[in-house]
C-alpha cells in the first residue's frame, strides 16, 4: 500500500468532520470483486454501504446488473440509475408495501422483488399485488443463524414456499440466506460455519425442485462469507462493504484484498489537558455502535486512543510531550463504514490528492420521491 496515499493537498478547503472517498480505490475494489468470482452475473452487491448514484454507475459499468437493498429509498436510487434487477432484502409491511407497489409502477424498466418469511405477510403482499394489478417475485427469507428475520429452512419453509406458489399476484422465485453472524477471522473456521449454516438451504432448494417447481435462485452471504459462497456454482452473492471497505473488515477479513476507499477527516479543535486532544468527530460523525476503541482508526496518528466521545467531540490520549497542535488534520478509517455513510449527506471525492467533486448520498434519506 502506497504510504500516505490518503493525503489531500487542498485540505484547507475542506470543513470537518467530512467523509471523503477516493474513486480510483473504489474502481480497484470493484475490479477485485469481479475477479473473485467466475461469473459477474452471480454478483448482487448491496447498496447499503455507499447509497449514491455514482458508485451504482461504476458497478453498472463493470457489468453488474443485479443489486440488493434494504430500504425503499435505496431501491429508488437504484431504479433512478436504471439498475435492471433490484431485490428489496426486506419484507415490506403496511405503508412500506404500498410504497413498494408505487415503486414498481413508477420504474417499469427495473425488475423488483422482495422477501417474505411468513404466511400473513405473503397474503398481504398477494392482496396488494392483485389490488394494484401487478405481479411480485418473492424470495423466501431463511434464518440460517442470524436470528433476526427469516424462517428456518425445513418443512415449514417448504410449505410457505408452496403456499406462495398458489397465492395470486406473487411468484416464489428463490431463497435468501444472510449469514451476517459468521465473521471468524480464521477463514477455514469461517468456511466451516458457513457450510454448516448453508447445508439446509441447499437441501430446501432441492426439495422444492423435486416438488416440480423451477430450481429456486439462492442469494447468500455478505462480505465476510463472500469468498466462500463465490466458489459455489450458481449462488448469487451480495457483499456490500467491499466498495469502501473499513477497519473492521480490514482486521477481520485479512484474506480479502479490498482497499480502504472512504475516510472521515477530522481536526484537532482543543487541547483539554497536557496529554489529550479534542477532535471534531462525535457520535454524529462516525458510527458509534461499537465500543469506544472500535469506532475510528487514524492513519496518520495510529498511537492515539479514544477516552471519551459525545455528539460533536472525541477526546483522545496523545501522551506526554506530544507534538499535536490546534488545527492538525487527522485521516480516520471508520471501523464500520456503512452506518457512517448514513451520517453524511454527501462525500467529497479525492483525486490526484485534491478535492475533485461531491457525491450525494441520496439514499441516506428515508424518502427520495416515493
Image: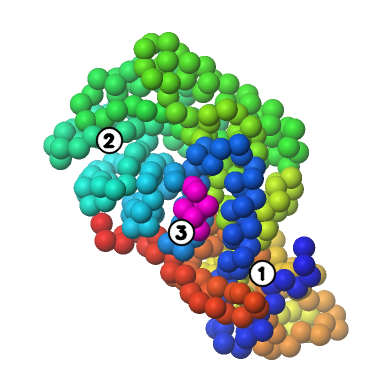
Mark 2 / mark 1, whichever is N-terminal: 2
| Separation of residues labelled 2 and 1 (CA atoms) | 43 Å
| Separation of residues labelled 2 and 3 (CA atoms) | 26 Å
Mark 2 / mark 3, whichever is N-terminal: 3
Of residue 158 and residue 1, the one placed in the foreground of this image is: 1
Contact between labelled residues 1 and 3, with CB atoms less than 8 Å apart:
no
Look at discs 2 and 3 and give the one toward the viewer. Answer: 3
Q: Dot 1, how many residues are within 10 Å of its Cα: few (below 14), some (14-19), or many (20+)?
A: many
In the picture, measured across the screen, residue 266 lies left or right of residue 311, that is right
Q: Quadrant of residue 53?
A: bottom left
Q: Dot 2, how many residues are within 10 Å of its Cα: few (below 14), some (14-19), or many (20+)?
A: many
Q: What x and y, as percent, mark residue 108? A: 25, 47
Rendered image: mark on residue 57: 3
**Residue at image coords 66%, 61%:** 260
The residue identified by callout 1 is: 332
Look at discs 2 and 1 and give the one toward the viewer. Answer: 2
For the C terminus, the image quarter is bottom left
Of residue 212 and residue 47, the one placed in the foreground of this image is: 212
What element does badge 2 sit on?
Answer: strand
Rendered image: mark on residue 238: none
The residue identified by callout 2 is: 136
Amino acid at each position: 500500500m502506497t504510504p500516505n496515499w490518503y493525503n489531500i493537498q487542498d485540505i484547507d478547503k475542506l470543513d470537518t468532520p467530512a467523509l471523503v472517498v477516493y474513486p480510483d480505490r473504489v474502481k480497484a475494489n470493484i475490479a477485485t470483486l469481479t475477479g473473485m468470482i467466475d461469473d459477474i452475473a452471480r454478483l448482487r452487491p448491496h447498496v447499503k454501504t455507499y447509497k449514491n448514484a455514482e458508485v451504482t454507475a461504476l458497478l453498472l459499468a463493470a457489468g453488474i446488473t443485479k443489486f440488493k437493498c434494504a430500504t425503499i429509498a435505496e431501491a429508488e436510487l437504484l431504479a433512478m440509475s436504471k439498475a435492471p434487477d433490484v431485490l428489496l432484502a426486506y419484507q415490506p409491511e403496511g405503508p412500506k408495501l404500498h410504497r413498494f407497489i408505487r415503486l414498481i409502477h413508477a420504474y417499469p424498466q427495473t425488475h423488483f422483488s422482495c422477501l417474505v418469511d411468513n404466511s400473513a405477510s405473503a397474503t398481504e403482499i398477494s392482496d396488494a399485488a392483485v389490488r394494484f394489478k401487478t405481479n411480485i417475485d418473492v424470495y423466501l427469507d431463511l434464518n440460517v443463524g442470524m436470528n433476526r428475520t427469516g424462517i428456518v429452512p425445513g418443512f415449514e419453509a417448504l410449505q410457505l414456499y408452496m403456499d406462495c406458489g398458489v397465492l395470486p399476484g406473487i411468484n416464489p422465485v428463490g431463497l435468501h440466506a444472510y449469514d451476517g453472524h459468521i465473521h471468524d477471522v480464521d477463514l477455514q473456521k469461517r468456511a466451516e460455519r458457513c457450510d454448516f449454516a448453508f447445508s439446509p438451504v441447499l437441501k430446501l432448494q432441492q426439495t422444492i425442485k423435486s416438488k416440480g417447481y423451477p430450481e429456486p435462485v439462492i442469494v447468500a452471504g455478505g462480505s465476510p462469507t463472500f469468498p466462500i459462497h463465490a466458489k459455489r456454482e450458481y449462488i448469487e452473492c451480495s457483499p456490500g462493504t467491499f466498495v469502501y471497505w473499513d477497519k473492521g473488515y480490514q482486521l477481520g477479513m485479512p484474506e480479502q484484498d479490498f482497499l480502504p476507499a472512504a475516510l472521515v477527516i477530522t481536526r484537532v479543535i482543543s487541547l483539554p489537558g497536557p496529554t489529550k486532544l479534542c477532535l471534531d468527530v462525535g457520535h454524529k460523525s462516525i458510527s458509534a455502535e461499537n465500543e469506544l476503541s472500535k469506532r475510528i482508526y487514524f492513519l496518520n496518528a495510529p498511537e492515539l486512543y479514544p477516552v471519551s466521545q459525545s455528539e460533536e467531540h472525541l477526546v483522545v490520549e496523545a501522551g506526554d510531550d506530544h507534538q499535536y497542535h490546534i488545527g492538525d488534520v487527522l485521516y480516520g478509517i471508520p471501523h464500520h463504514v456503512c452506518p457512517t455513510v448514513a451520517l453524511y449527506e454527501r462525500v467529497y471525492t479525492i483525486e490526484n490528492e485534491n478535492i475533485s467533486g461531491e457525491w450525494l448520498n441520496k439514499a441516506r434519506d428515508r424518502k427520495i420521491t416515493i
